[in-house]
Image (tube, rainbow, N blue to C red):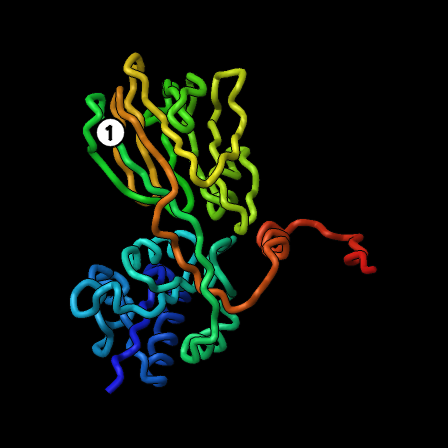
Amino acid sequence: MNAPRNVLVVAHAHREDTVAAAARVIAALETARLRAVLAADDAELYAALGHPERVGALGQDIAVDEVELAIVLGGDGTILRAAELVRGGTAPVLGINMGHVGFLAEIEADVLDDAIARVVARDYRVEERMALAVRVTDASDALVYETWALNEATVEKASRQRMLEVVMEIDGRPLSTFGCDGVVISTPTGSTAYSFSGGGPVIWPTVEAIAVVPLSAHALFARPLVIGPEASVAVEVLTRTSDIGILWCDGRRSHDLPAGARVDVRRSEQPVRLARLHPAAFTDRLVRKFRLPVDGWRGPVTA
């Protein structure tokens, strides 16, 4: 007897449209004899769905390495949460945009039924995206926190009233000391998120690189940097600073940074896997998501 195929369903529990879409997905999976799985700790979604009886519980009766794929209904924040839930397994994440920009999402909600059929048929390709490994050490170099990020790791000031004084290091060598609102260390996937808002470049997903973007830095040399994928970046909170900083990873996981704390960021050995249904060009995604004007385009030049 074949083992059951488990599909994780992740949805924004406070929106009626995403909850209704999640119910449709669960029903369609059941009809196709696939088992829908919900995160065991997602009590709000369970309640919003009326406590469905025939779903598995991730972390209880279903282990993360038993999940074949995650279907995500929501915006980028919900997709980041799903990536967090399947971390440690091999399940790719298929994002169905129910939000606004939804840059990580593969498709829009109006083709939901087709997407489910493609999942059932395993008719999708998997794209690996670089992630970041993040370590925090204290003033005595003791490891105090360790996590990861798909979009970005950001060292920020914890108080609006003061700047954060930091020294930045690339590949074990000091680069510059300055006061700032923060420093964003981004993957190509995250280059269209916080890094972009801070003035960083858009990096094509096929380019393996890390972007470093100082935020409101009081320094002559504080421009965004693009460094190699195997490079390491460190940001130290100077001991002379009077305020603590805070580390945020993907806007979901945080850790306080007292004076003397050091944040080391490098490429993670484990990428994030995204399921793709259509081989759309990244240029088209930029145009669609940012609503860029392309009036007057004559089409590609052909020989």
- Residue with the mark numbered 1: 137
Which residue sits at x=24%, y=29%? 137
- What is the x, y in percent for residue 82? 34, 58
Vertical side of 183 occupied by 92: above or below: below
- The amino acid at mark 1 is Thr
Instruction: Using residue 126 as the reference point, say whether residue 54 is left or right of it.
Output: left
Residue 250 can be seen, yes or no: no
Q: Which quadrant of the rendered structure holds the N terminus? A: bottom left
- What is the x, y in percent for residue 81? 33, 54
- Number of marks drawn: 1
Task: Looking at the picture, tell me which residue is in the foreground, 208 or 199.
Answer: 208
- What is the x, y in percent for residue 196? 53, 39
> Local crowd at mark 1 within 10 Å, few (<14), some, or many (≥20)?
some
Instruction: Using residue 5 as the reference point, say whether residue 173 is left or right of it.
Output: right
Task: Looking at the picture, tell me which residue is in the foreground, 164 or 231.
Answer: 231
Instruction: Using residue 301 as the reference point, say whether residue 291 is left or right of it.
Output: left
Quadrant in the rendering for residue 63: bottom left
Quadrant in the rendering for residue 92: bottom left
Task: Looking at the picture, tell me which residue is in the foreground, 73 or 278.
Answer: 278
- What is the x, y in percent for residue 36? 30, 74
Q: Which quadrant of the rendered structure holds the C terminus? A: bottom right
Which residue sits at x=43%, y=80%? 121
Which residue sits at x=28%, y=36%? 135
